[in-house]
Image (tube, coloured by chain):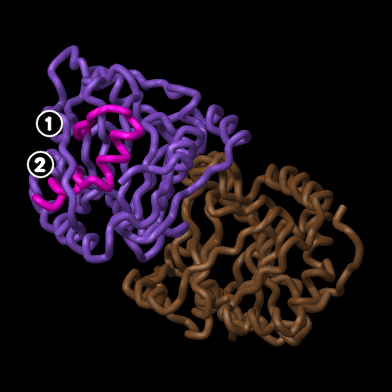
Chain colours: A purple, B brown
Amino acid sequence: MQLSEQQIQQYDEDGFVLLGQVFSETEMKAMAGAFLDDQEVPGPHRVMEDDGVKVRAVYASHLRHPVFRHVVRDSRLLDPAKQILDSDVYVYQFKINTKRPFGGESWSWHQDYIVWREVDDLPSPAALNVGIFLDEVTEFNGPLIFLPGSQKLGTIEKPKARDEKSDVHVDPEDYSLKSSDLAELSQARHMTSPKGTAGSVVLFHPEIVHGSATNISPFSRNLLIITYNSVGNLPRHRGEPRAEYLVGRDTTPLLAVEGAVA
Amino acid sequence: MQLSEQQIQQYDEDGFVLLGQVFSETEMKAMAGAFLDDQEVPGPHRVMEDDGVKVRAVYASHLRHPVFRHVVRDSRLLDPAKQILDSDVYVYQFKINTKRPFGGESWSWHQDYIVWREVDDLPSPAALNVGIFLDEVTEFNGPLIFLPGSQKLGTIEKPKARDEKSDVHVDPEDYSLKSSDLAELSQARHMTSPKGTAGSVVLFHPEIVHGSATNISPFSRNLLIITYNSVGNLPRHRGEPRAEYLVGRDTTPLLAVEGAVA
């Protein structure tokens, strides 16, 4: 599946483009079932909420479950990723962020790339985030909120002081934007929040400023994010690389697969 | 100002009606200035956020500031209140809930009436909440969220165990709805969130289920809520009544004033 000229242009301008429903209801049921299975697998790839009981995020399901192994290679995602990055790509990071009903937590305003630059020595933001809505996203269940066009400013957030390179899940709180920066940014850019049915897909730039509020609704908002990286933009890993569940080791160009997720 | 038949019908059906912009920009500047002044007045009527520094709510400004003394009597609010309650009314409670940029907190799902019934012995929900948007309300700054029609179910939430009647601000957390109740409710009713420019007014029923999420945006969302009570529905106060800033003592029917807030 190729993006239209208009979609490419919108991505360039706004730093994101919502593709609408890409995966069918049946395919979403397959993904939901696969996620239910996979979130039971214990290990450091599973990040818990502050209560220590609920799952906040699960990494690298594509290395464990055949459904997600297919999803990351699905031509409906892979073709647009290669088109935008104008390059072969591989999976840099795979995560499913859960946002539970009645209290799923917020994510501070942040950009993604600076984390990868600081922690993995990723040379440039020549990567692409592909978000798949595992649940319907509405204004009520803590949707992603973007500041359109903010990716054009490059890296604006500053890392906080860090004692050592962390091998664990990196909390965007460590890199969040100053309130004054954000206040200034949003004078010029209107916050936007892509919404849609389960199976919708949004592509977004590693430097677009984004965040999300708490989910007080009775509906979960689970979001799968695949970060494709250009094979020309491999992390330099000055020290010991982070664990494979956080930063993909297999940098072989992905080959597209056709057919439904099942 | 009288409500139309359609507005009355919508209130009866949904438990709320959004009137759009009632107060002009100039009037809203007067209210904003008055609130700035009034929130400096120390006392128990001023509720702080958990950090002990920021103001979360201010009660009874209409007893301290001439601008708000006018507002509660403004015919644009008082006439619709008398029309809906079919009765003379007085101010049962006046509060301004602030919701600060970058972290103004959420309010759990709750109904209002049960609190007043339990704490003040208010005989019936023959009261009306009038919300004035002191700031523009968008999907991003933690708007009120309603479950339309839920007021028809009457009191569904249960008070938690309480040791004694509190003389202080009552936290809706003490009365919040069970998640299972809310999940069931929202199968049948779609959450709705009234939005609009500063100066917009929303009327809502004391038994409509409502809540609001955190405000992660750079824009504050301050909301003035006047609760008018029917003079035929006076609280019985079996014990010592709560402080006057929480529950109005002057039950004389309000007389409408005309003219702009200044």
Q: What residue type is labelled 2?
A: Leu
Q: Between marks 2 and 1, how big is the CA–CA gap?
A: 10 Å
State which region is magenta: A66-92
Assign a secondary structure to mark 1.
loop
Quarter of the view holding residue B53:
top right
Q: Looking at the image, do the residues carrying marks 2 and 1 touch, with CB atoms under 8 Å apart? A: yes
In this rendering, position of residue B168 left or right of residue A62: right
Q: Where is residue B79 in the image (x, y as percent from the top left)?
A: 81, 76
Is A71 part of what is drawn in magenta?
Answer: yes
Residue A118 drawn at (x, y percent): 29, 19
How many residues crowd around disc 1 within 10 Å: few (fewer than 14), some, or many (20 or more)?
A: some
Residue of label 2: A63
Residue, far right = B259
Q: Please tell me whether the stretch drawn in magenta is mainly helix, strand or loop.
A: helix
Residue located 41% across and 47% down the image: A144
User: Which residue is at a point 28% across and 51% down the rendered structure image?
Assistant: A98
Q: Is residue A207 left or right of residue A1?
A: right
The residue carrying mark 1 is A244
